[in-house]
Image (cartoon, rainbow, N blue to C red):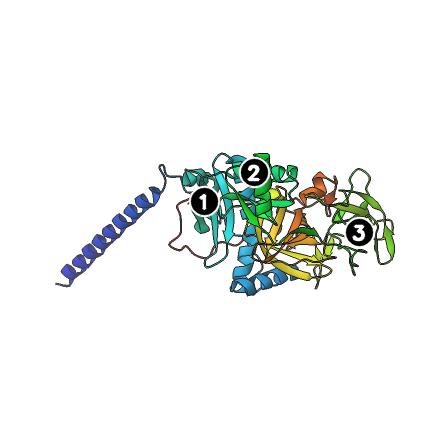
Amino acid sequence: MMHSKTENTVLFVLACLTILISFSLQGTTQAARLFDSPIPRQPTPQPTPIPTTTSPIPSALAMDAKAYAAVMGVDMDEAIRRLYLQNEIGELTKQLFENEGNTFTGLWIQHKPHYRIMISFTHDGAATLRSYMRNTSLADIVELHETTVTFRDLEAARSEAAHIAHELGVRASSAINVFTNQAELYVLDPGALDEKLGRAKIQLPNHVEVIQFTELPREVTDIFGGKALTSCTSGFSVLDRSTGIRGVTTAGHCSNSQSYNGVNLPFMSGTPDTGGIYDIQWHRGDQAFTVRNLIWDGTYNRYIYGVKFRASQSVGEWVCKYGKTTGYACGTIATTSQDGVNIRVDNMTVQGGDSGGPWFWNNTAYGTTISACSLGDGTPCAIYGPVDQIYNILGLVVLPVKVSVTTSGPPPPAARGCSSRCRGWS
């Protein structure tokens, strides 16, 4: 009798296992159907440990993460995880711009109510993203959208609209809004623009929305820099590789006559003092000082170990700034296409004396303050020129030159678990 019960138990267990395996295989088949043809799953790379609240955190990272955690309502570990992900997100943004221009319409980071990477295409977004999602820690937080106009076409429309406004003598600024999939032309008086367009018998391009601003970008100058320069704020330490001369940058519209601690800093080169969308200059510093790869963020002397070019900066990315007047503050990128070449951060105040000051995250250089602005509802905003201008206009490199560009710090930690939003990218 005992032997018969054992056999029945064994048979029952085997039957249960058979049913479970069957369900598992069905689930795998259904997951594979997310795409027309399944992609073989690649080996999962082992995550590289990064600082958490249970291990020492670099002071610069801790400062930025603390600010992020307070604004977004998350703990420090989650804040650090999200900030490290920005390197990988930036690289993805750059690749999509370069490789998928015929269908890519935009990428932005959503922080609330759930942390997501929103990516939009005109069509076939899932198929396009499949190869980019292999061996990535981003797959579980990507959310696809479909819009009608490519970023490339929006940039062409924005550029044409800005040119028309300039030719009509209308002061304007412009950008691309990836949230609404349109180009935007910002003016003080839309009615005056319409009148001039009518008289000239000109129409703005399709997909351009005219938006009234209460204040357009203005130069932030005319106040002593305190710890930095005479009338502005220094940005980053730079090197002219052809001569070996080292110095510091500031905004191009600042006076060419700048000093630090009473010592004159000879002007080297830069864009015109009248300002413009390109706004950068540099002054020699090594004739009297040791030029080091540091920035003052209001609390610490923070090392700069690398740079992040505009192509790798993403809408929604968390960035911080320092200016001699308004000090340290952080916010999220609203557009990476302000006037086609600059970056705008909304809900951010900069004032006279802040011009030329650094924008950064952790130990990575992002750009330098150009101007202040106000949105139509009075919300303050700030515009910074990306570090590209240091390289492409001045022909310099940001110190230290031995560190590769576009990245900073170790890889991000693995995502926490897998929710119902997990996608079969790999």
Disc 1 is placed on an element classified as loop
Mark 2 = which residue? 198
Q: Nearer the viewer, residue 77 or 269?
A: 269
Point out the image quarter for the N terminus. Answer: bottom left
Q: How many marks?
A: 3
Q: Name the residue at 23% across, 51% down.
A: 19
238 left or right, relative to 261: left
399 left or right, relative to 159: right
C-alpha gap between disc 1 and disc 2 = 61 Å
Bin the neighbour count of mark 3 within 10 Å (Cα to Cα): few under 14, some 14-19, many 20 and up. some
Mark 3 = which residue? 291
Point out the image quarter for the C terminus. Answer: top left
C-alpha gap between disc 2 and disc 3 = 55 Å
Q: Nearer the viewer, residue 322 or 85?
A: 322
Amino acid found under the numbered disc labelled 3: Val
Disc marking residue 43: 1
N-terminal-most mark, 1 or 2: 1
Bin the neighbour count of mark 1 within 10 Å (Cα to Cα): few under 14, some 14-19, many 20 and up. few
Q: Nearer the viewer, residue 146 or 118?
A: 146
Amino acid found under the numbered disc labelled 2: Gly
Disc marking residue 74: none
Q: Is residue 411 visible?
A: no
Closer to the camera: disc 1 or disc 2?
Answer: 2
Q: In which image quadrant can residue 325 be found? A: bottom right
- Asked if the residue under mark 3 is in contact with the one under mark 1, i.e. CB atoms within 8 Å, the reply is no
Q: Nearer the viewer, residue 402 or 182?
A: 182
Disc 3 is placed on an element classified as loop
